[in-house]
Image (cartoon, rainbow, N blue to C red):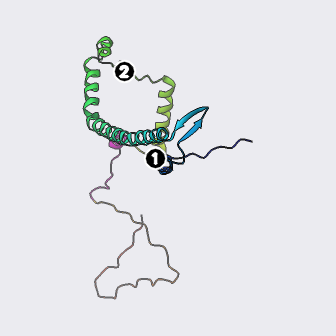
């Protein structure tokens, strides 16, 4: 039956080494030496080994902090300089587009031309035509062909008549005799 040891973090390991070292220094008189793997190891030597482990762990922490700061500085510098470097690369691609040997001197490769197959072109044209038909869109020439129409000199405006209501509407009465007016006529077109 095998058992697995739980993972011990670096701070836990450092605390364990410090406690072990403190205990060995405190009880050095009663524990003068240890027999480990057939060899005799004195207590001060074990304390020295534990101290070197603690020093190494502290160095790792400080080195890690320095490394993290260096990585952050590198990322910041790259973010600031990316537009410049990208612009230079684009300019070189434009200036030396026909000269792959010169581009290679800068570590660049010529851009590959974008090739669209005839089948893709046909499919795109069919899709565009279907979209125009679905949206009822027109081009500039089609729009130019559409003209408004005038009826002689008078502009004819048609409006939709209001829907009939449930109550009957009164009919207009004829003008009284002698008023000299004419009754208005209603025209529907």
- Taken as a whole, is the magenta stretch helix, strand or loop? loop
Residue designated by label 1: 135
The magenta segment: 139-153
10 part of magenta stretch: no
From the viewer's perspective, tell me whether residue 103 is left or right of residue 57.
Answer: left
Q: Is residue 142 above or below residue 85?
A: below
In the image, residue 73 lies at what x, y percent? 29, 39
Residue 3 % position (x, y): 69, 44
Q: Nearer the viewer, residue 51 or 97?
A: 51
- Where is residue 100, by image quadrant? top left
Which quadrant is the C terminus positioned in?
bottom left
Q: x and y percent of residue 70 in the render?
A: 32, 38
**Kind of element beneath mark 1:** helix
Q: Badge 1: how crowded within 10 Å, few (<14), some, or many (20+)? A: few
The residue located at (47%, 27%) in the rendering is 121
Q: Quadrant of residue 141?
A: top left
Q: Is residue 73 left or right of residue 7?
A: left
Between residue 74 and residue 64, name the one nearer to us.
64
Label at residue 111: 2
């Amino acid at each position: 039956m095998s058992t697995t040891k739980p993972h011990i973090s670096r701070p836990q390991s450092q605390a364990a080494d410090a406690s072990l070292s403190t205990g060995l220094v405190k009880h050095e008189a009663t524990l003068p030496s240890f027999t480990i793997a057939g060899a005799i190891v004195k207590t001060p030597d074990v304390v020295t080994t534990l101290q070197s482990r603690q020093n190494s762990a502290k160095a790792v922490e400080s080195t890690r902090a320095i490394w993290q700061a260096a990585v952050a500085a590198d990322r910041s510098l790259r973010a600031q300089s990316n537009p410049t470097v990208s612009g230079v690369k684009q300019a070189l691609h434009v200036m030396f587009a026909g000269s792959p040997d010169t581009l290679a001197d800068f570590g660049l490769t010529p851009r590959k031309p974008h090739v669209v197959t005839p089948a893709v072109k046909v499919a795109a044209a069919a899709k565009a035509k279907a979209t125009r038909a679905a949206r009822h869109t027109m081009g500039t020439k089609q729009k130019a062909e559409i003209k408004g129409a005038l009826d002689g000199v008078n502009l004819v405006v048609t409006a939709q008549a209001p829907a009939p209501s449930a109550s009957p509407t009164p009919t207009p009465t004829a003008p009284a005799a002698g008023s000299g007016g004419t009754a208005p006529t209603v025209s529907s077109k």
